[in-house]
Image: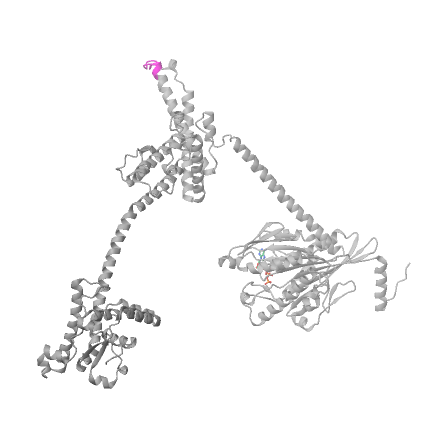
Amino acid sequence: MFMNSPTDENVSLSLTFLGKKILRSSSVAPALKQRAWETAAALPSDSDVSMETGRRAGRSRNSTAFLEELPGSVPDLREEVRRCPPCPVRNTHLDRDAAPALCEGKGSWLNRSRTKWTAFRQWVKVGRRANAVTGAREDTQPACARPKDWEEDGSNDVKIFIPYDSAKLCIAQPMLLLSWQITEDMQLMKTSHLEMVQELEENFQMASKQNQVPAALQELQITRLELGKVQEMLSPAEPEEQRPLVESSGTAQVDDTAEDLVEAGAEGGTQTPRGAAGKRPLEGAQARLENLKQNLYKREREITQFLQGDADGSGQEGEPTRQGCSALLNAVIHKAHCVYVEVSEARLLLDSMAEENQLELDRARELLEQLQTSAPQHGNAEEGTPKPERGDTDKEHQADLQTSQVMLQKAEIIHTALDCIRRGTRPGLDRAWETGHSTVEPGAEPDQDQLQLQQVREENKRTTENYNSERIMRKKYYNMVEDMKGKIRVFCRIRPMNRTETAGGSKPVVDCVDEYSVVVETPRGLKEFQFDKVFSTASSQEEVFQDTSRLIQSAIDGFNVCIFSYGQTGSGKTFTMVGDKDLRNPGIMPRAFRKIFDLIQENASKFDFKVSAYMLELYNDRLLDLFVSPAEAFGRKIEIKKDKKGLVFAQGAETMAAGSAEQLLALLEQGCANRHIAATKMNMESSRSHLIIGITIESTNLTNGSVSYGKLSLVDLAGSERAAKTGAKDDQLKEANSINKSLSALGDVIFALSSEQSYVPYRNNKLTQVMQDSLGGNAKTLMFVNVSPSDCNAEETLTSLTYATRVKAITNSAHKNLESKEIAHLKEIILKLRSGQPLEEEV
Ligand SMILES: Nc1ncnc2c1ncn2[C@@H]1O[C@H](COP(=O)(O)OP(=O)(O)OP(=O)(O)O)[C@@H](O)[C@H]1O
């Protein structure tokens, strides 16, 4: 290729060729290829080079920078070409001179090409070597200056003729040249990297050497601080001058010198002059530690002396302060008491030590008593025996006395210490010190502070008791007022844990705080509920009934009374209302029957009573009469109606008269036998229906003839249940759905009543229809909310208690169902006329 016009582009192309890039064949005219390779070494001036560089930078700054940086890049080569004399490979004549054999056709094409290429490279090297010899810098005049005639030519265009076959090699050679150059460059880079790494290592070593001393000092400073803290802990009442030097030297002095540290470690805490700088810092720290150890031993000795009653050294220098010892001793005894309480082995050990000590104490006291009473009797010595010298005997006796006193003191101190540890009480050593006694009895008179503390404690106790009793009274009166207002009363009963729950690893989470409050442990903390009465797991059936009996009196007096139990399945509703299966623990119903007839008996001289009862169950949304056989019951249609006074009655159900409690009990047993009961996962005898017993008590006042109608409704609701928990399937699932539906309807009624809504949805379910006169009606109502104590039922328990809290808000309007004598007489006449009976003439 030949470029006559040295445009930038052409220069670029030709230099690119020289600079190890292969020319693109498309830019080479085929005709020219045939002739020769011609390179226009444009030899641009410096300004041209900079212009060129700038333009390229505009196009691709990164690539340009890269080319300019690498040896053999475009500017490099340009410079090289500029410095060197024209290439001698101008034409094939050179070939002829250099290797005539080749020119004469000897040698292969490849050999000839190689020779020419070698000549070209030698020409390039000449320029480099010349540069190296003169040490010329790039910006100075090149050592291998251009021949003068060349400059005189005034032509910058130098034509380099490369034979075509050489050019072919040139096309191949740049690759070799490139790889060679890259290898060389990489070698250079590697060398420089190694140098850099070495330099960095040296720097790092120097820096770490510089840092080493401060780091060590810092470490030692921290050690000193820690030691200072240890000493502080060990000697709370230590005199000022014994405090660790660290306090005075400050905490952030990282640049402390080794001398400072030696100072800190000086023996006995006294300062060593700064001149003692030959010691190493660690030695100073060790000395300090040694000093601390010595202090600790000293303290231990002092305390031991103190405990042994060796107060002889009082007033001596270095004696521990009384407060310090007392505080420390208290702390030790407190810790020992904690261990005694918590570790059974320690308890055993201390108890056995106390027993041994007691024996020792008794022995020591006995011995001392003997010695005190048996003073040496010099005159009574038996005849014939040599009389000891009076002075010797006295001395011996005195010595024995002293020894036994010491023994007693020792035993008493140990006794005090053991007693304090066992009881966790503060030793009365301060008082012993003050009074000069070395021993203090466990029951020793407390000091003024203790007396005050005792008084405050007792006062607190009294105040708490007063508060509690007042709180209970307040609740009681509040309930009475609520009762008078007609509020439904709610009792809560917690049943005991059953075997399944205990075996399953459940734990109780429900507890009664007092007789009006119950708390449930929930994941979010304790939740407290207040009721008119709370019965704990320990409450008996009798106790539960006692609070209920007042209502039975109301029924006798002509009020409409309803007692019902509500709660999760298996929570103890039937147990509360009916009792256990064989009625060894009768519940409210049998007890109520007895109570009715007891009261009737009591009032027999004033009233005439008639008692009748019906017994229904609501099973799968059907009301069934329990006084007839199940088969017959399914054939009957029972409807809930209301009389003129708003009292509910069951039309179509048998009503049985009862003249005694036994008759009523028999009826109850008969009814319960007909009731639907089945075993579920939650309860072996789960009631699958709601049980409703209505007992009507008609009482006629024998004095004025007035008649009152009291009604006692006793309802044992079926338990709310989750099918998954009870394992209910098929028929049981149907039963459970019906139970839940009716309870939900009851919930709606309770919600409407408690929120005083104008419409109460009694008619939505047969259960709510039956209970209409008990909830919000003309009744005194008592609800039992039965709960399980177990954590596995905690969710249901919370639901039940929340439900029951709502019920408490409902107000009934209870009033006596009373008729005057006249009305009663007129009613009787109407009945007789209707039935066609003759009317008796009144006298
Ligand atoms: N206070 C209690 N003391 C001793 N045992 C009790 C107590 N309460 C309940 N139980 C026992 O727990 C079991 C379940 O009680 P109960 O049948 O009364 O539950 P329930 O609430 O009526 O259940 P369901 O709604 O399924 O009929 C019974 O064996 C019962 O004897």
- Choose between 21 and 535: the one closer to the eye: 21
- Say which quadrant the N terminus sits in: bottom left
Rendered view: 337 above or below 163: above
Residue range highlighted in magenta: 383-392
Position of the C terminus, as image quadrant, is: bottom right
Please state the horizontal and vertical placement of residue 238, each as a whole percent of the image: 40, 33
516 relative to 290, above or below: below
* Residue 737 versus residue 702 in the image, above or below: below
Confirm whether residue 415 shows in the render.
no
Left or right? Give the position of 825 relative to 405. Answer: right
| Snapshot quadrant of residue 653 | bottom right
**Ligand 1 position by quadrant:** bottom right
Between 206 and 430, the one lying in front of the other is 206
| Residue 384 is inside the magenta segment | yes
Is residue 659 found left or right of 171 in the rendered image?
Answer: right
Q: Position of residue 680 (x, y in %)?
A: 55, 65
Q: Which coloring applies here?
A: one colour
Q: Main secondary structure of the magenta part?
A: loop
Q: Residue 818 magenta-drawn?
A: no
How many numbered circles does the render carry?
0
Residue 100 quadrant:
bottom left
Q: x, y percentage for residue 507?
A: 51, 55
Task: Give residue 620's position: percent from left, percent from top.
Answer: 63, 70
Query: Can residue 823 be seen in the rendering of this structure?
Result: yes
* Residue 579, quarter of picture: bottom right
**What residue lies at 86% left-to-right and 64% top-to-bottom?**
829
- What residue lies at 37% left-to-right and 22% top-to-bottom? 400
